[in-house]
Amino acid sequence: MNKKGDKLVRGLIEKMRADAAFRKRVLAVEDIDARMELLKKEGFDCKVGDMQLYLRTYGGNEGQAVVLTEKGGCNGIYYGFCF
Amino acid sequence: MALGPLPTERTGSETIWSRYNKLFHSPRLGHFVYNALSNTLFELDESNYRCLEEFRERATDCESLSPEFLAALRQNYVITTRWEEQRVLLSNRYRRSTTNFDSTRLGLTICPTLKCNFRCPYCFEHTQGDPMLMSPQTIDRLVEFIKGYRDVRHLSLAWYGGEPLIGFDVICKVTERLKSLDLTFGGAALITNGYFMDQRKCDLFNDLEIHSVQVTLDGPEEMHDTRRFLTGGGPSFQRILANLDTLLNSTFKGSCDIRVNTDRQNVGTFQELRDTLLERFKDKNICIYAARVTPAHDYDRSLILNLEEWTDFNRRVFQSSGFVPISNFYPSINLDSVCVGTAHNRFVVGPRGELYKCWEDVGQPARVIGDVHRADPITNPELRAQYSVGTDAYSDPECLECSVLPICGGGCANKRLRTKYFDEPGLEYCSPFKDNLVQYLEAYIDIFMNKEMCAAILGSGQNETNTRGYRKISPETKPNCAGGSGSCSQCS
């Protein structure tokens, strides 16, 4: 993914997690455009697309392979090597 | 903690801190308690964390906990009784047994040949020079062997070797015969080095009901070719890549898994390979994953990554690219160590019709447990029993005291067998969770919180706050899911 966008979103999430007052202030803004504008003023000039891409990339859904439980007869073990 | 005599409803009724708990604090992520018996993770505020710490250390009463929180802890066996723990463990053991002895399913891993055109130094087989192909007579006997399982309603296959595509005609003949049986044919997986995967074969994969193809690439070209070279030493990377192009541009409807056998030699090149493959095969149905090389024969053991290093590798890869390991970070309730080795109706079939209980035993006469040519095909029922019930962690005092038993189930049956019965030193059969549970949970929590925070920023602006001082953050499990069904987030 875009390294710059990745870094920005990562920084934003860390700040949101660590700083309760900041989190409260950001999430109090109901309109998404206004919220992004506030984030920009706070130094996090990330786009909605960056956030969505980050979510797709770091959302934990990648890397799933076929489990052979039903298909190949090997349950809990992938193709002969334990993981 | 010694188990002592089995608790009864009366003697085991004292409220205790579960031996399967892990209470931990992460400076970056917060306070948590995980219980392996229920596979549940709670996020806690500091106050509740301290209360649990107190309870764990002094087994004090639970008055400082809210009734609602206490009920949640009891429901998820964080605070429990020895009697209750015993009952759940027995239930798990029962589940393992019913899966192991399911007589309605037959799973066969068939090696059309043990011959291989590669000489990968870490390979656990050592019969790559054996030119034998499965004969028509052996195919006949294999079909009779399958018919002998009268209760079986479902048959699934994996093609393996040696290099199975050297025996592609055998694959075609066997599949044709098996599809004509009065069984639900669950299709097949193909484990190949990819070198002989040409257009003609790829076009036949759908007819052969091959639903997934696994090909191994061990890194970018230079790295791969130093590890996965031809007999005699030629390179293989470019040809495999071209064959993957052929497969992924063919009519093949299944999935393609690209496995990267990983050790100290190539651990640093995984991401480069992955980025290259994702770029080359974008929009294709592929999965790239790393698998840990384990000790085999005279392969240099100093190259093997230990479980801690393996955990670190997975975390680093996730942090830099978002890639989650194939086994996920969060423990899975289907990790009950049921495999070909332990299951009564699963076998590996060699080209001579010899039967084994594990892929890693292929080609080793001492590990043969049967022969499809015999009227009574099981010739070594003792070894079969050792694999199945002899590797049962619920019978192992050491495992019964282990805090991750419910999510491990005993680990690798083959390595446990070789360690426990054949005195082979230096094999790791335990789950990586045994010594690295917190690291795995932290990685999961990171993902969970990333998702939650992104969703809050992109959504209505609200996110679930931990106002009660605790909340359950483990993946949702469908009610009554026994694991392994693939129908809920913990076992799919």
Image (spheres, coloured by chain):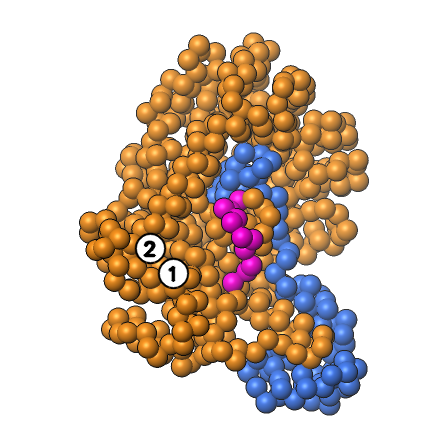
Chain colours: A blue, B orange
Position of residue B277 measured from the top left corner of the image (x, y, whole percent): 70, 51
Q: How many marks?
A: 2
Q: Secondary structure at mark 2?
A: helix
Whether residue A64 is visible: yes
Residue type pointed to by label 1: Tyr
Which residues lie in the magenta part?
B474-484
The residue identified by callout 2 is: B84
The residue identified by callout 1 is: B77
Q: Is residue B259 magenta?
A: no
Q: Is residue B481 magenta?
A: yes
Position of residue A55 measured from the top left corner of the image (x, y, whole percent): 67, 67
The residue nearer to you, when weighing B301 against B468, is B468
Whether residue B437 is visible: no
Disc with the residue nearer the chain's start (1 vs 2): 1
**Chain letter of the residue beneath label 1 in the structure image:** B
Magenta segment's dominant SS is loop
In the rendered view, tell whether residue B419 sits above or below residue B154: below
Residue type pointed to by label 2: Glu
Q: Residue at x 66, y 37 (%)?
A: B212
- Residue A22 location, quadrant: bottom right
Looking at the image, residue A43 sits to the left or right of residue B95; the answer is: right
Q: Residue at x 57, y 11 (%)?
A: B140
Say few, some or many: other residues with alpha carbon within 10 Å of mark 1 (under 14 / 14 to 19 / 20 or more).
many
Q: Residue at x 33, y 62 (%)?
A: B80
Discs 1 and 2 lie in a common subunit: yes
Position of residue B421 measured from the top left corner of the image (x, y, whole percent): 29, 35
Say few, some or many: other residues with alpha carbon within 10 Å of mark 2 (under 14 / 14 to 19 / 20 or more).
some
Q: Are marks 1 and 2 in contact (CB under 8 Å)?
A: yes
